[in-house]
Amino acid sequence: MAPIPRPRFLAVLAAALCALSTSVVGATPAQAAPIKTPPLTTPWTSQVNPANPLPEYPRPQMVRPDWQNLNGEWQLRQSATNDAPQFGVTLPERINVPYPVESALSGVMRPANDNRHYLFYRRTFTVPAGWNGRRIQLHFGAVDWESTVWVNGQQVATHRGGYDRFEADITPALNGGTNELVVKVWDPTDTEQNGMVQALGKQTTTPSGIFYTPSSGIWQTVWMEPTPTSSIYSVDYYPNLANNTLRVRVFTRGNVSGHSVFAEALNGTTVVGTATGGFTEFTVPVPSARRWSPSDPFLYNLRVSLRNASGATVDQTTHYFGMREVGTATINGVRRPTLNGQFVPHIGPLDQGFWPDGLYTAPTDAALASDLQKIKDLGFNMVRKHIKVEPARWYYWADRLGLLVWQDIPSMTADGNINANAAQQAQWETEAREIIDEHRFSPAVVLYTPYNEGWGETSLATTTRVGNELKAYDPTRYMNVHSGYNCCQSLGDPGNGDLLDHHHYTGPEAPRATSTRWSALGEFGGTSLQTPGNQYSPNGQFGAYEQVSSQTALTDRYVQLANSAAQLIRNGTLSATVYTEITDLEGEVNGFFTYDRRVTKMDLNRVRAAHQGMLAAAGQAPLPRVTLPVNGRISLQAQNVTSRYMRHQNSLVRTDPVTGSSDALTKNDATFWVRPGLADSSCYSLEAVNVPGNYLRHSDSRIRIGSGSDALFRADATWCARQGQTGSGVSLESYNYAGSYMRHYNAEVWRSQGSGGPAWNTPSLFPNDSVWNVVAPWAP
């Protein structure tokens, strides 16, 4: 196994960090709580400066020149009871903010099952003299879960939600000298303390399997900035490629009566378009706009000035944007997602964003960016951010590097026996809308997923309603209402959204696209390789969907899966794949890289080549449909073993030799009526001539004959006839598993896509084994 190569983007990274750091006002030097020893160290663990952790500007999509970082050593008190805050009192412990209390980098590293769910943070700060006369805004990137904030004993903010930012104007509470900041956090995680069911993603107090050590308390940067009395609060903007404009809407604080907004679009430092507007949406021209895409992630700058009634600028912020649009189109009869008007398959890994040293919080900004660079270097063009929301800088790097982002809304409990009450459901929906609001700026973010495998799902009607409402809240992005609705404790297909999303381990298999929804494989793969010394499990156990024993075997298996997915893109209706996953995690060893990011587990060149093949498949014409004689009889001859014919026997379908001297039963078993497809009349169903009402259908991948009338049976018994994969004959494609075909193997007949795993699914000879000659019926 090779070590992780040195990222090629370090020079760019260093320059970008410098550009974002040179004009800031430094905080008073902090002390440092000693870092504990994590279960695994990453290449960045030793680079963490606990006296000044994560010093980079935390909001790169809306920059002001003056700010102060409040990360570093804070005082801490942990309590099992709902105590009152203490003011003017030194707390007993020390913690490195913004690392969660369970992490080694925090200097605390408390166990996952610690029942002290109330955390009290304290520090002091002074406001730089140069900020006099301005309002002081205190920002929290994310605090899990319920927060109350006091400055000098005066409550200034309360907030619920562990994945969205909040802020407060603390000016009235300041004393002109040394100020005291106290934060109280309550985070019951999955304990249901006080009956609470909250958004928590994959966090648990009993880590095992696919659920991991929690990240309680402050876990993103705390900082403050000065703003004018009348100021810009936020800016939403959306590109319009049809007329090369940027739609802009500015939200403000304070009294802005008589004020206006002046917006400038810039290519680097060159102004290319300007517009003046108010506080409703207006447009800024971007002439001959260069499109943002994964292959060309070009970013423009945007300068927004708030002007008073006399035209003087009272506030100014700088932003960036990408000119890109997502949509849908029907191409070769298949519903497809489009980027800037072109079908581009979304090919990426699952990324859960955990670190062995920092848990939810990456040790450094370089570490945060490095994971995305690895994804890019592998030839992916997308990443699914799974059941977690990252700091704003993660999306900044995705925007700069050119990765489409599928953003999950962190779910409530995955325990199917626990349902949120109405108030908790409403709180979760409020958090979902806030997450959407905070990512309107990002060209990378193209899709939201509110539900995953039924976690936190209270009713199918609620799922459908939430999907519709969130789609209406941001109609410029795809809505994947329920990822993996075919799996686990899901209540089923919500029937809406822009796509259908199945999970299949190991796969790949995918739902057939409809006229309104494109097809995605939201999770698949998960092949595991253990790397002792570079893996960690809290309970010493490692799960696996399937396991191999070497880097070569892991690469071989992945390439098999990727090649099969490419055929699903070309000949099926698949438009997106998400492989589990980019790195190992606690108890999981199915990554391209180990949990500590120190070992590369696959041959990256072969992986990259496989992804190039998947992307190229989008431009290849699918195998054409062929016509069968409806209401006529046929027999099906194995093209590569011409002495053998498809026949049923004891309800199972197999191949056997059939000749003119065969008995009548054998000839009848090998003859089928061609009927219009039970699920789709443009395809076919094949009825046994000697068992009327019984059709060839798949069940657990085996082909058999059976009868039925429900929707699942009709879909399982419908086959679409395509030109044979060898260039002649016919390949019979499953209607509800597009891209998989009837295939003979050792005299048995299976539904297969040739992706490996079970012997009947081997890629060896798959194109030949899945081609049949349509011949005269043995039983006319």
Image: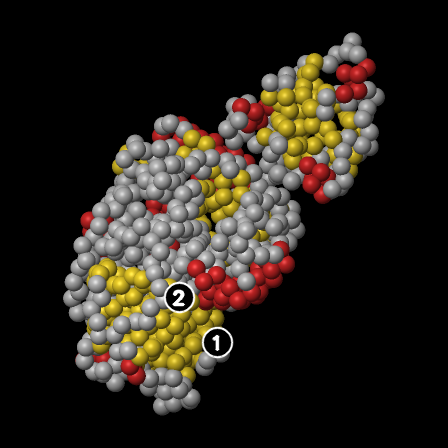
**One can see residue 577 in this view:** no
Percent x, y of residue 310: 36, 90
* Image position of 693 (left or right of 749): right
* Image position of 521 (left or right of 651): left
| Disc marking residue 112 | none
Residue type at mark 2 is Glu
The reply to whether the C-beta atoms of the residues labelled 1 and 2 are less than 8 Å apart is no
Percent x, y of residue 176: 21, 82
Which one is nearer the viewer's eye here, 387 or 95?
A: 95
Which one is nearer the viewer's eye here, 92 or 241?
A: 92
Percent x, y of residue 216: 35, 58
- The residue pinned by badge 2 equals 146
Frontmost of labels 1 and 2 is: 2
Percent x, y of residue 113: 36, 51
- The residue pinned by badge 1 equals 282
Specify the quadrant of the image occupied by residue 678. top right
Q: Residue at x 21, y 71 (%)?
A: 89
> Which part of the image, by quadrant, shows the N terminus?
top left
Q: Secondary structure at mark 2?
A: strand
